[in-house]
């Protein structure tokens, strides 16, 4: 995810976000959301995170977000996580051995459990 797309994802006008310095220290960012947090730019709940995003045409802006909106706009790497690569290798080895398997990513529902 491109950091400059954060305002678009949060559905906020970057021109309405407060201007920010080019860089800041962790202490300065913590002070910004410390004891009296600013509101999340997307929903108004108390912000738990802040960051500076360089938005083309408007310059650096503060993005103060609550935890759900921070998670929704966190950069992700296109490379699969090492765990995903390990599970993929395991799946391939099991298939090669001719064993029927299923990978559960959530607990079975009662109907699934009963069905076997």
Image: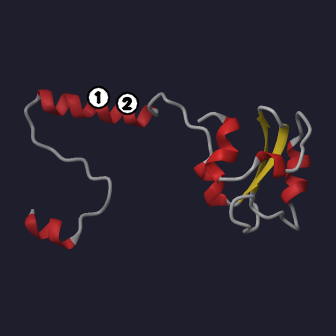
Q: Which of 16 and 105 is in front in this view?
A: 16
User: Which image quarter is the C terminus in?
Assistant: bottom left
Q: Is residue 9 depicted above or below 91 in this figure?
A: below
Q: Mark 1 points at which residue?
A: 89
- Residue at (83, 37) in percent of width and height: 58
Q: Is residue 104 depicted above or below 82 in this figure?
A: below
- Residue at (46, 34) in percent of width and height: 81
Instruction: Please state the horizontal and vertical placement of residue 14, each as a whole percent of the image.
Output: 77, 46
Instruction: Please state the horizontal and vertical placement of residue 92, each as a whole percent of the image.
Output: 21, 29
Q: Which of 63 and 36 is in front in this view?
A: 63
Q: Which colour scheme is used?
A: secondary structure
| Mark 1 element type | helix
| Mark 2 element type | helix
- Residue at (14, 32) in percent of width and height: 95
Please tell me in which quadrant of the rendered image residue 60 appears: top right
Is the residue marked by circle 2 packed among few (<14), some (14-19), or many (20+) residues within 10 Å? few
Q: Which mark is residue 85?
A: 2
Please tell me in which quadrant of the rendered image residue 89 appears: top left
Q: Decide if residue 88 is on the left or right side of residue 16.
A: left
């Amino acid at each position: 995810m491109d950091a400059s797309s954060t305002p678009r994802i949060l559905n906020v006008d970057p021109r309405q976000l407060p201007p920010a310095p080019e860089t800041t220290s962790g202490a300065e960012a913590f002070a910004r959301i410390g004891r009296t947090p600013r509101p999340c730019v997307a929903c108004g709940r108390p912000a738990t995170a802040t960051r500076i995003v360089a938005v083309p045409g408007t310059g650096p802006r503060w993005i103060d977000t609550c935890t759900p909106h921070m998670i929704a706009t966190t950069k992700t790497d296109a490379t699969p996580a090492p765990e995903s690569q390990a599970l993929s290798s395991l799946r391939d080895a099991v298939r090669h051995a001719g064993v029927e398997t299923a990978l559960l990513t959530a607990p079975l529902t009662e109907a699934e459990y009963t069905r076997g």
